[in-house]
Image (spheres, rainbow, N blue to C red):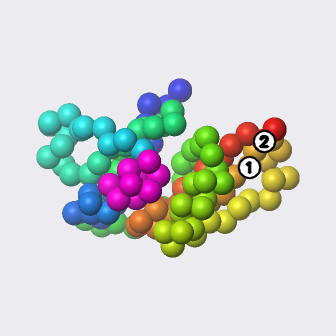
Amino acid sequence: MIHHVQLAAPRGSESALRAFYAGLLGLVEVPKPPPLAARGGCWFAGHGVELHLGVTDDFHPAEKAHPGLLWPDLDALAARLTAAGYPVTWADEGELPGLRRFHTADVHGNRLEFLAPTG
């Protein structure tokens, strides 16, 4: 079982991260323990996942590596992302039988995959 997944973000981008992960995706920000809070970044949780967004000076988005997140309503999420100007690329349902899924990118270009069981 995985406790959390960490993604990278540019230093000083916490406001943009909150707008995307809490505002758009609807995840809840988790307070970081004080010794770790000084490092910057944000933590978010919801839908059975915890994401840690760590900041770095030499940021490069993860364009291939990505978390695959089970999500309760893919169509509503895809509509919110599209309306906000984020790319939504649906995968062929035959690639992973029993799952619907799409890929998008977060505010800094990190690849994200959202999945839901079919039927």
- Residue 51 drawn above or below residue 110: above
> What kind of secondary structure does the magenta stretch mostly adopt?
helix
The image position of residue 110, as x and y in percent, is 47, 62
Which residue in the protein does label 1 denote? 100
Horizontal placement of 65 versus 28: left or right? Answer: right
The image position of residue 5, as x and y in percent, is 45, 42
Q: Earlier in the sequence, mark 1 or mark 2?
A: 1
Q: Is residue 87 magenta?
A: no
Which residue in the protein does label 2 denote? 118
Q: Amino acid at mark 1?
A: Arg
Residue at left 79%, top 47%? 96
Q: Amino acid at mark 2?
A: Thr
The image position of residue 20, as x and y in percent, is 40, 58
Q: CA distance from mark 1 to mark 2?
A: 6 Å
Point out the stretch of residues depicted in magenta: 18-26
Horizontal placement of 47 versus 115: left or right? Answer: left
Number of disc labels? 2
Instruction: Pick the residue in front: 91 or 24.
Output: 24
Q: Which mark is residue 114?
A: none
Q: Determine whether the residue tagged by mark 1 lies in a helix, strand or loop.
A: strand
Q: Are marks 1 and 2 in contact (CB under 8 Å)?
A: yes
Kindly tell me whether residue 48 is visible in this rendering.
Answer: yes
Q: Determine whether the residue tagged by mark 2 lies in a helix, strand or loop.
A: loop
Q: Is residue 23 magenta?
A: yes
Mark 1 surroundings: few (<14), some (14-19) or many (≥20) residues within 10 A: many
Instruction: Pick the residue in front: 67 or 24.
Output: 24
Q: Residue 116 is drawn in which quadrant?
A: top right
The image position of residue 63, as x and y in percent, is 53, 65
Residue at left 81%, top 53%? 93
Quadrant housing the C terminus: top right
Residue at left 47%, top 52%? 25
Residue at left 69%, top 52%? 101
